[in-house]
Image (cartoon, helix red, strand yellow):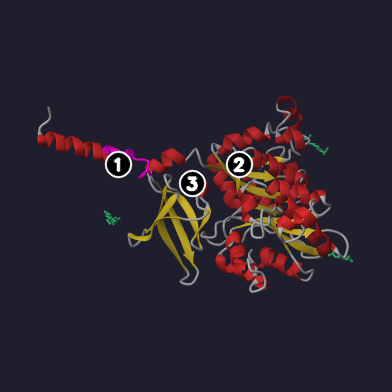
Amino acid sequence: MFSGKQQLFLAITILIINRQCDPENLRYAFNTEWFDAEASLTRPYLLFYYPSDCSVELTDSKLNRTFLRRTRVEGVSLDQLYEGASLHIFGRLMTVLGFADDFTRNRLSLVKQRTFAMVKPDAVAHMGEILKAIQDHGFTVSRMKLTRLSEEGAAGFYEEHKGKHFFDPLMQFVTSGPVLALELVAENAVARWRELIGPTDSAKAREAAPDSLRARFGTNATLNAVHGSDSAEAAAREAAFFFPDSRSCRRPGLPTTACFANNTCCVILPHLVKAGRVGEVLQAIEAAGFRVAAAEMFYMENANAEEFYEIYKGVVPEYGAMVAQLVSGPCVALEITGDGDDLPERFRKCVGPRDPEMARHLRPGSLRARFGVDRVQMGLHCSDLPEDGPLEVDYFFKILQ
Ligand SMILES: *[C@@H]1O[C@H](CO)[C@@H](O)[C@H](O)[C@H]1NC(C)=O
Ligand SMILES: *[C@@H]1O[C@H](CO)[C@@H](O)[C@H](O)[C@H]1NC(C)=O
Ligand SMILES: *[C@@H]1O[C@H](CO)[C@@H](O)[C@H](O)[C@H]1NC(C)=O
């Protein structure tokens, strides 16, 4: 039938085709970088992700040399690989700059789209409920900050509306109180977020889309509860406005809303953030009568996590595992405020015993009983001593800013 030469040719062709289609070798490529603080240098790496076994490989893009041989990395999955994402690989905080080849871009660009969302001053009191709706609809929150727009900032953000009849009332409204800025990631995120928020005018939204966020939380065309970018380009621009990139010119970010008085600190741990439960936790904290005065998502470095947990070193046996948990993904730091001198005590009681198992027996209504798994994935960190609260709030909202 086939000559020896033909057979060999056929075999090689099949081998090549197989190799390309072989799911074992299917890989996605991303341009990433890592800021080496010691050398004060940004180092570029090509990151390959193999979905067949969830392994990762890193190549030093400058030296064209393998930096990390193909291996599985705890906590890294395809979910976390999109433009602008931050991820930890063996203690290094890497930033994903973008897709590194056409195959990856074609397969993933719509699957992993980013959009910018903002909860406006009229709806910030409902931020827990809104975040829960966001997370229930399959969006991943990749950045988040409770902040305040100055007049100048608001005018810059809404530049394209300058001169329109609604510009002045809009300026007045968005600078009237805190706003929650969010970057969301999902398949087709821009369109899906606009669908979830509904028509611009909340009054019309109540007729046309009664389940939409603007129908539920807004009042009219100005006081309309939430913002959503209208295109992928606008999303990139708007996200950059609120979340200036650490690698570009280091423009200071927008101010925090922390009040640095009569406060205590709470951190929603990465395992809960990953599970999409930030909204539920905020709802539970507010239902218990506490006020969330400041909130921001952080991607902690190993050194920061060790520093933050310093007082537990040598005191609790889980110290190492706690540090590992804190850097395993983004966490959300909160400044909690409320009336009375005993706020830290009351909040600590509300959070419950360190061991969630014990909490479920002793204080079943406490936050750790409801949201914790074990002594490491304990759901929430809270300041243990009243005098630590302000220091921990300072750590997140002053030092890490
Ligand atoms: C990197 O090295 C590989 C072989 O190790 C080579 O095939 C490739 O052309 C090199 N790329 C660059 C940009 O030098
Ligand atoms: C929206 O409602 C607010 C508060 O009721 C009111 O002051 C404002 O004029 C309304 N704006 C529009 C465009 O209807
Ligand atoms: C803190 O609380 C005390 C009383 O509990 C009060 O006198 C003081 O004004 C509060 N400080 C601020 C900045 O709210």
- Using residue 295 as the reference point, say whether residue 44 is left or right of it: left
Label 1 crowd (10 A; few <14 / some 14-19 / many >=20): few
In the rendered structure, the answer to whether residue 125 lies left or right of residue 182 reads right
Earlier in the chain: of badge 1 and badge 2, it is: 1
Q: Which amino acid is tagged 3?
A: Leu
Q: For numbered disc 3, what is the local secondary structure?
A: helix
Q: Which residue is mark 3?
A: 78
Q: Nearer the viewer, residue 14 or 339?
A: 14
Residue 169, position as x, y percentages in the image:
75, 42
Q: Earlier in the sequence, mark 3 or mark 1?
A: 1
The stretch drawn in magenta includes residue 47: no
Question: In the image, is the residue at mark 2 within 8 Å of ligand 2 by its beta carbon?
Answer: no
Q: Where does ligand 3 appear, by image quarter?
A: bottom right
Disc 1 residue type?
Answer: Arg
Height in image: 340 above or below 283?
A: below
Which circle's residue, 2 or 3, is located before the other in the chain? 3
Q: Quadrant of residue 68?
A: bottom left
- Tag shown at residue 139: 2
